[in-house]
Image: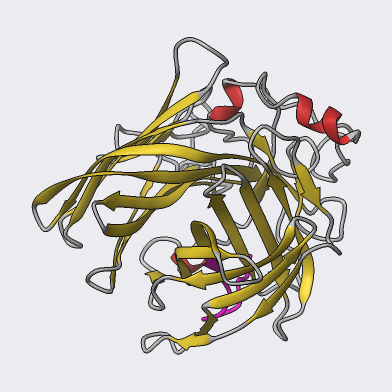
Amino acid sequence: MDRRSLLFTLAGWPALTCADAHGQAEAQGKTPAPSAAAPATPADLRFPADFGAHPETRTEWWYVTGCLESGARLWGFQVTFFRVATGVSAPLAAASAASPASRFAPSQLLFAHAALTDLEQGRLRHDQRIARSGFGIAQARLGETHVSLRDWQLNRTPTAGGPPRSRYTAQVSSDSAGFAFDLSFDATQPVLLQGVGGVSQKGPAAGDTSRYYSEPQLATQGRLTLDGKPIAVQGRAWLDHEWSDAFVPASAVGWDWVGMNLDDGSALTAFRLRRADGSSVHAGGSFRAAGQPLRNFGPDEVRFTPGRVWESAGSRARYPVQWKIETPAGVFGVNALLDNQELDSRNSSGAIYWEGLSELRDANGRRLGRGYLEMTGYAAALRL
């Protein structure tokens, strides 16, 4: 398996249910849809177990994005840990009958991306890592969110008192890119189950699904270090955890996705799988106002219309950095806060993609919140 095939070995997608979120499917009056890659009635996701890794599935990721503030200064950040089951279980050398497999076999790969959007300097800092699982170098733990790759870590602990909630911590340091962050993220809302009961449909076929939950509106604080200078920061973040054996539809070359924390406490997700001609293969998303039931979007209820386009001098890819997104929750504008937020991850996942801090606006141009926009398949089609 070469590096270029790894991330989009990654294009599996996720779902769940927990004490805080179990009532969402009931509130919608719906039953989870069957998946070809799972039993006819997928099992409810159970926490804390499903906060952890699912190595029996092919692809999985834990993905945290958000904004950081210090005075009038604003940054965007992301850290993502990917786990990929390679399908390799035989030893690297010839096996014996007494030892049919080897602990050195690279059955699981972990890689990680970290990026910082510095609006004041008008630049994106980015680093990446890859390693096989094990040997104290990289791990994705069962039963709880604990993923690490060398000294990069993302961990979860339950908060004490009140309803069960999450506290995440992330530590990332990059000497080559000149940044580091040590951040904590406190859940302020129940877990949000994407799709029907956490079964997220990603295409027209029954098996085009993932298990997928989000933790929006994470209260964030900690320390950002830029070129050796520590800065105390605070802000808001969004976490996605997704896993699947399924692939994106064969006719899709990539996807467009937004996860937005609105200033009033609402959370908006919208995505579409995209053909080479720019038309949608499948679309979806959700909206949850603070303290209100989740509203999932059907594939015919979401429309992405591109606006202004920015061309990368490096890849020559052309990315829409402004969008109009129509959903049952409203019509929104998405504007990138920096055009050049393209990430070249060919030394780990094998892909070039755009992912960056953006603003959400209403139809009159009024700012509603901030979050992240991700666009893949513009530099080259994603092939699994």
Residue 150 sits in quarter: top left
**Residue closest to the eye, 82 or 301:** 301
Q: Nearer the viewer, residue 187 or 69?
A: 69
Q: Is residue 201 left or right of residue 34?
A: left
* Type of secondary structure dominating the magenta stretch: loop
Above or below, 9 relative to 13: below
Q: Is residue 18 above or below residue 228?
A: above
Query: In the current view of this chain or complex, which residue is farthest to the left?
Result: 228
The foreground one among 85 and 71 is 71
- Residue 383 is inside the magenta segment: yes
Q: Position of residue 50 (x, y in %)?
A: 60, 27
Q: Is residue 191 above or below residue 73?
A: above
Percent position of residue 165, x then y: 52, 22
Q: Position of residue 345 (x, y in %)?
A: 39, 66
Of residues 76 and 169, the one nearer the viewer is 76
In the picture, residue 233 is in which quadrant?
A: top left
* Position of residue 113 in the picture relative to residue 310 (left or right): left
Q: Indicate left or right for 308 with 276 as reference.
A: left
Which residues are the magenta region?
374-384
Residue 154 visible to an observer of this rendering: yes
Image height of 60 relative to 161, above or below: below
| Residue under the point 62% across and 57% down | 11
